[in-house]
Image (cartoon, rainbow, N blue to C red):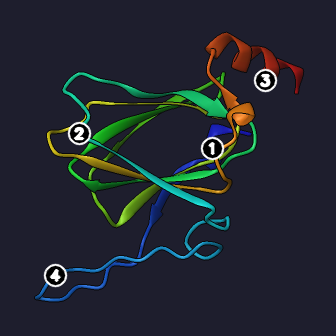
Amino acid sequence: MNIKNCKIVNLPKIQDPRGNLTFIEGGNHVPFDIKRVYYLYDVPGGAERGGHAHKELSQLIVAMSGSFDVLLDDGAQKIKFHLNRSYNGLYVCPMIWRELDNFSSGSVCMVLASNYYDESDYYRIYNDFIKDLKKK
C-alpha cells in the first residue's frame, strides 16, 4: 500500500446546544466493517505508542479527547498528522508503519479496526517491515 491512501476522514458532526454528537458507520464513513474497537488513555507524558505495521488490518484513529501526533511511514515517505478533533479520523491502510506520540494530558485515542486481534498480522520490527515491502 501507499501512504497516499491514508487520509483524514471527516465524520458527521451533529451540533446541538446540549452537546455535539458524532457517529461512525462501518462501510460508510470507513471503507471497512468494524470488527474491533480499542482505546488508549492515561498515556504518560513523553510516552510513545504504536511502533508497528499491519499486513492486512485497516484502522481509523480518532482523538476522542485531547490531541496526539501520528507518524505514518510506507518505507518511501513519512507524513505526520496532528489529531485533535473528535469528528476527524485518520484512515490507515495496511502495510503502513505507525508511531503515536506527543499525547496531551487527558487524551483518549480510539481505534476502529477491520479485523479481530491477530498477532501474526503485526510487524513489530521495522527492518522486517521494510524487507517485506521490498518483496512486493
Q: Quadrant of residue 4?
A: top right
Label 1: which secondary element: helix
Mark closer to the chain start, 1 or 4: 1
Going by the numbered disc 1, the residue's amino acid type is Lys
Give, as a three-letter code, the residue at label 2.
Asp
Q: Which mark is residue 133?
A: 3
Asked whether the beta carbons under mark 1 and mark 4 sit within 8 Å of each other, the answer is no
Task: Tell me the residue at 68%/10% (across/down).
Answer: 127
Q: Which residue is mark 1?
A: 4
**Kind of element beneath mark 2:** loop
What amino acid is at disc 4?
A: Gly
x and y, in percent, of residue 98 in the image: 52, 32
In this figure, which residue is indicated by the disc labeled 2? 42
The percent position of residue 134, horizontal first and vertical second, equals: 82, 18
Q: Nearer the viewer, residue 94 or 123?
A: 123
Of the 4 image quadrants, the one containing the N terminus is: top right
- Disc 1 to disc 2: CB gap under 8 Å: no
> Mark 4: which secondary structure?
loop
Q: Which mark is residue 19?
A: 4
Distance from Cα at disc 4 to Cα at disc 2: 24 Å
Upstream in sequence: badge 3 or badge 1: 1
